[in-house]
Amino acid sequence: MTPLVRIQSGPFDVAAETARITRGQLGIGGVVAFTGLCRDEGGRLAALELEHYPGMAEEEIGRVAEEAASRWPLMGLTAIHRHG
Amino acid sequence: MSVMTKLIYFAWVRERVGLPEERAEIPAGVATVADLLAWQQTRGEEYAHAFAEASVIRVALDKRHAAHDQPIAGASEIAFFPPMTGG
């Protein structure tokens, strides 16, 4: 199982990613999705710009994904992080 | 023969230094990340300002997070960023 890691500025669709990860994989019995959101800190935060280090972001998240894949018998793993 | 190392700056470190990245020759004797941060403070007013609080600066050597006591030898790309938050 090769984790899929994407760093992108554009939005992503959880339903589409769920369909992608399960496509042709009829042995998968469950899919868990976590979506991180930017909070407004009680109204104190109006905007946030997220910079990223191209190359390192993918590698670092990839390392975490590989660790997860080694700890649990995962059949698929997708990690997407937005920037901008 | 001098070895030029790529130095990359992010967020307010970049804003204070005034450069997104540069190539520089790191002097012999600068052995660890802590030494490197101390050297940065000496390179000019903008650098002194950017690296004044060296202990909070995060450093990556060839795209891997490095502790401040880690040797920098062999790194071809060194990145500097403020503390990151998440969640």
Image (cartoon, coloured by chain):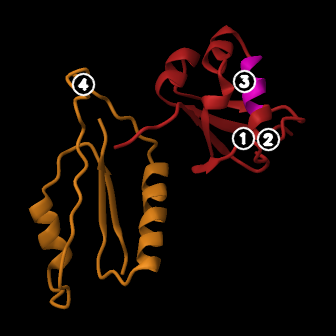
Chain colours: A orange, B red
What kind of element bears circle 2?
Answer: loop
Identify residue for label 2: B32
Q: Which quadrant would residue A6 be assigned to in this image?
A: bottom left
Tell me the CA gap for discs 3 and 2.
Answer: 12 Å
Task: Answer whether labels 4 and 2 touch (C-beta < 8 Å).
Answer: no
Q: Position of residue A30 (x, y in %)?
A: 18, 79
Work out whether disc 1 and disc 4 sit on a shared chain: no
Identify residue for label 3: B40
Identify residue for label 1: B68
* Amino acid type indicated by mark 1: His
Task: Answer whether labels 1 and 3 touch (C-beta < 8 Å).
Answer: no
Q: Is residue A2 above or below residue A64?
A: below
* Amino acid type indicated by mark 4: Ala
What kind of element bears circle 3?
Answer: helix
Q: Quadrant of the C terminus of chain B?
A: top left
Most common SS among magenta residues: helix
Does label 1 or label 2 sit earlier along the sequence?
2
Tell me the CA gap for discs 1 and 3.
Answer: 14 Å
Task: Answer whether labels 1 and 4 touch (C-beta < 8 Å).
Answer: no
Q: Position of residue A51 (x, y in %)?
A: 39, 35
What kind of element bears circle 1?
Answer: loop
Identify residue for label 4: A47
Front residue of A31/B71: it is A31
Does label 1 or label 3 sit earlier along the sequence?
3
Task: Answer whether labels 1 and 2 touch (C-beta < 8 Å).
Answer: yes
What kind of element bears circle 4?
Answer: loop
Q: Residues within 10 Å of mark 2 (few under 14, many from 20)?
A: some
Tell me the CA gap for discs 3 and 4.
Answer: 31 Å
Work out whether disc 3 and disc 2 sit on a shared chain: yes
Tell me the CA gap for discs 1 and 2.
Answer: 7 Å
